Image (cartoon, grey):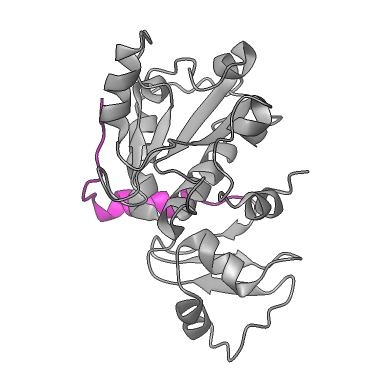
Amino acid sequence: MNFPRRQFLQNSLLATAGWMLAGPALFGASPREITYRVRKGDTLSSIASQHGVSVADLQKRNRLKGDRILAGQKLVIPGEAANALAIAPVIAATKSIHVDHDRWRYIVIHHSGIEDGNAKAYDAGHRRRGMEHGLAYHFVIGNGRDSGEGEIEIGPRWTQQLRGGHVRKTEVNNTGIGICLVGNFEKRRPSAKQLAAAFDLVDWLRAGQVHPKHTLTVHRWVDRNHTVCPGRHFPFTTLKRRYRLT
């Protein structure tokens, strides 16, 4: 169930990935670079963290002498921060399936709560617990231990367009896409590469794979009083600011 793994793709696929990544704050650029428009409340460090680059690299690429940035200013995010290699397999796999866009009304972010594991391991575990379709999530994002750091693994619930099994609420399972970042974020923050991959995946899903009136949320906001997922060190403030969540 661990498919497809990160693979070296043809340049043409990466070029396609570059423009398909565009979300509400991203503007067209090459597969290796994107342009970001600064929003009110952004800081250079928060932008760097969102895109998995260092502040120093961000300053160097944009010839900034300090940390001062202004709302509306455009910044070039350097290198492969567009995460084309991570998102390209998702785009490629999705081309061969029929996505029920109107069905998907939720995108729910989780952590695994443990540092080990990947999509294959979690699939086996969920099957042992009696879950008919195995892996409860649609996507798993690795932490570098059992899959690549920031690697997006695609589960059969996405390729087969099946309901999730990742929350307690039936409605949200029926209409919600589950994204699980590997790690215990009660003890640490997700890595910059994991966050960059998660946000790129969310941006791509929101740009045409889900119902226009969908809800982006996290597990603890769905199943209140039942879980701390995705952990107290998950950057909730960054998530809310990036997607203007209340």
- Residue that lies at the very extreme toward the bottom in this rendered image: 65
- Say left or right for 122 vs 107: left
**Magenta span covers which residues?**
1-23
Q: Position of residue 52 (x, y in %)?
A: 45, 63
- Give the residue displayed 49% in from the left and 49% down from the top: 200
Q: Residue at x 29, y 51 (%)?
A: 144
**Is 177 situated left or right of 194 in this image?**
right
Quarter occupied by the C terminus: top right
Please provide percent x and percent y for residue 21.
49, 50
Of residues 197 and 112, the one nearer the viewer is: 112
Query: Which x, y percent locates residue 207?
Result: 58, 41
The residue sitting at the left extreme is 8
The residue lying toward the viewer, choosing from 72 and 155, is 155
Q: Is residue 15 visible?
A: no
Q: Is residue 160 above or below residue 37?
A: above
In the picture, the quarter occupied by the N terminus is top left
Q: How many marks?
A: 0
Where is residue 224 drawn, in percent x and y? 68, 27
On screen, residue 213 above or below 34: above
Which of the two residues, 122 or 18, is positioned nearer the viewer here?
A: 122
Side (left or right) of 241 relative to 203: right
Q: Is residue 137 visible?
A: yes
Q: Residue at x 41, y 33 (%)?
A: 139
In magenta stretch: residue 20? yes
Residue at image coords 40%, 20%: 157
Q: Does 34 appear in magenta?
A: no
